[in-house]
Image (tube, grey):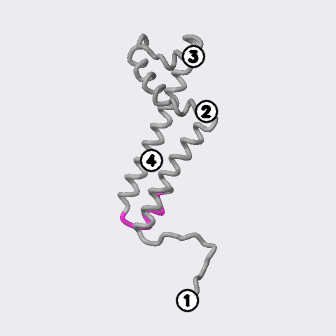
Amino acid sequence: MAIIQTDKPYEPTTFEEIQEQKLEENSQQAQRKIEEFYKNSPDFEQKTFPIQQTEYYAYQLDENVATPYIDGITLDDEEKEELMLNIGIAIEFVQSIQKEMRQNTKDIYACDSIECLDNLGI
């Protein structure tokens, strides 16, 4: 028996396969947006973001709270305020992407036909 090779990638055809593909595309799309947002940030900034985020939230509740990590990377109060603003912007951006991804996932699961999935724009 001969093996037939084709240059075409596999295309899903069943509803379940297309639904799974849409879920994967949704995840990849969200990841690309976040990577694009952080592409000019140094690696250590990305790795320490959870620490910065924790200190940011605490600082929003009480400006006198200890923020040892952020204090350690800023030169003065003015720079700290600017960094806090930038952390807030980053948090809002990531949250908006997460919210969009959750809504897309909900929309994908709400579909009951291939046509519906095709019309999602994902």
Q: Which amino acid does label 4 sit on?
A: Met
Q: Earlier in the sequence, mark 1 or mark 4?
A: 1
Answer yes or no: do the residues labelled 4 and 2 have beta carbons within 8 Å?
Answer: no
Q: Name the residue under label 2.
A: 41
Q: Nearer the viewer, mark 4 or mark 2?
A: 2
**How far, Cα to Cα, is label 3 from label 1?**
69 Å
Label 3 CA crowd tier, 10 Å (few <14, some 14–19, many 20+): some
At a point 63% along the width and 73% down the height, the residue shown is: 7
Total numbered labels placed on residues in the image: 4
Q: Say what secondary structure mark 3 lies in.
A: loop
Q: Earlier in the sequence, mark 2 or mark 1?
A: 1
Label 1 CA crowd tier, 10 Å (few <14, some 14–19, many 20+): few
The image quadrant of residue 36 is top right
Q: Vertically, is 41 above or below 55?
A: below
**How far, Cα to Cα, is label 4 from label 2?**
23 Å
Q: Nearer the viewer, mark 2 or mark 1?
A: 1
Q: Mark 1 points at which residue?
A: 1
Disc sitting over residue 101 in the figure? 4
Label 4 CA crowd tier, 10 Å (few <14, some 14–19, many 20+): some
Q: Which of marks 4 and 2 is nearer the N terminus?
A: 2
Q: What residue type is labelled 2?
A: Ser
Q: What residue type is labelled 3?
A: Thr
The image quadrant of residue 80 is top right
Residue 65 image offset from top left, x and y in percent:
41, 13
**How far, Cα to Cα, is label 2 from label 1?**
54 Å
Closer-to-camera residue (91/46): 46
Which quarter of the rendering shows the N terminus?
A: bottom right
Disc sitting over residue 74 in the figure? 3
